[in-house]
Amino acid sequence: MMCSEREAQLNQYVDGTLAAEARALVETHLAGCAGCREAVAKLRALVDGARGLPRAIEPASELWTGIAGRIGKGERGKGKRWWRGALAAAAALIIGFAVYRLLPSSAVFYGPEVDGWAAAQIEYARATDELAGALALERDRLEPATVALLERNLGVIDAALRESRDALARDPGNVELRALFAAAARQKVELLRWATRAAT
Amino acid sequence: MTRHSSWLVLVLALGARSGTAQAPPSRVNTIGERWPFAPDGSVRIVNPSGRIRVIGWDVDSLAVRARGPGRLAAAGTASVRTLVVTGRAGLEVRVPRGARVWVKSVSGDIDVVGVDGTLDLNSVVGAIHVVGTPADVTAETMGGPVELAGGTGRARVKTVSGGILLRGASVDLGASTLSGTIVVRAAGWQRGGAGVQRGHFESVTGDVRFDGELGRGGIVELESQSGAIALRVPGTTVADFDLLTIGGSVTNRLTADVAQRGALRFSTGAGGAQVTARSFKGSISIEAK
């Protein structure tokens, strides 16, 4: 069993974002903790697996085209826009990763542990908020009819997600429910990504 | 100023003479233009508001006609050409059948007829309509409907609220919508098809209907959060069926097998297709055509 207080640090370790000193400390800990070693192996496998994410949950190439275009504008003095684009891209990637973790195949790594599932949901919610925030900054660039369409469908998807979440609360280990929740979550990501792209 | 002269007609220019000639957008009273074009050349079309119609023809040239208020800029070579409209001009583009066509629109409808190459079609709220047998189609629209008729090697379609209709002899189909409906009418060998070899159809609140033939060894997945899922297949279909709804009901009129607590698994023979249907609270039904 992994040391729960080290979860964030182990993620950073696997991501290669730890400073040398912290990295050395983690490695010292890993040498004596089989649970954390196992967790690191699983995380690495997950990251490797994430590289082969299904196309449907990857940000479309056009998204990057739009962001790249905005980065170009940013270089010409619109730094704020660069950050909005980067935020959207980061959020999309985080969501992709989160949704990947929500998929049934992730049960191979997380099995019956609800912690991983709950963490993935929190991660998904946070990233969705970030992407929605990025979109909010650009929504005035959308046609009113598009905004209305977007809001109507965000309402639809949020209601569907609530239903799935409630059902999961009653039956947290149900793999089919998780898959349906993941599919709905992916649809929300797609919708936000789409709207962000349309606004750029 | 007369109504006629107030119309902006195109701007088509000139790339044919110099390899990558760039024509500045301008207002000219030109109705059409034509360039030599490779049989498998790439065309990129951007027209935010006007209707876009792309027609495949057996001629190695690219021809454009535009009409309405707006400007059109054309640039490129004999293998790659970009057409960009500003304003609301409608556009009719004739391309070699094997061309690769990329279209982006905001509110305009996109129609493609008779193109056998690759299509990448994107609109925000416009409709997308494809007739023919393109090798590969990607079609996305938030608010509009999508219809593919004729058959494709591979198609990936996404909408938010628009309905999706896929009909014809297609092999590999993927369709996803949030609140729209998905209807698949897959042709079998009688109409030149081999049935769907790979299909993935998912909706959150919309209904999903599959009506047609399954390819031998094919894999078809249908999923809806709250919409109904309906399957109609030939009575002679050989397949393994795995149907599950958590809060809805399963109705089987294909065989005598009965669902238990929203779940039904049965097989009509070995070595056939695999069909999976999943719903959270929608109903699932299966019957013979």
Image: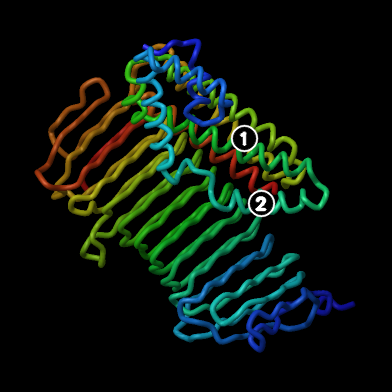
Question: With B235 as the anchor, is A67 left or right in this view?
Answer: right
Kindly identify which residue carries mark 1.
A152
Of A44 and B215, the residue lying toward us: A44
Q: Position of residue B32 (x, y in %)?
A: 66, 83
Residue A5 in view of the camera: yes
- Density class for disc 2 (Cα within 10 Å; few <14, some 14-19, many ≥20) is some
- Residue A55, compared with residue A20, is above or below; it is below
The residue shown at (69%, 84%) is: B14
The residue shown at (24%, 41%) is: B275
For disc 1, the chain is: A
For disc 2, the chain is: A
Question: Same chain for marks 2 and 1?
Answer: yes
Q: Position of residue A195 (x, y in %)?
A: 63, 43
Structural distance between the alpha carbons of marks 2 and 1: 29 Å
- Residue B68, compared with residue A90, is above or below; it is below
Of A3 and B155, the residue lying toward us: A3
Number of numbered tags placed on the structure image: 2
Q: Which mark is residue B218?
A: none
Residue type indicated by callout 2:
Ala
Question: With B88 as the anchor, is A153 left or right in this view?
Answer: left
Of A8 and B216, the residue lying toward us: A8
Number of the front mark, 2 or 1: 2
Of A16 and B6, the residue lying toward us: A16
Q: Position of residue B108 (x, y in %)?
A: 64, 60
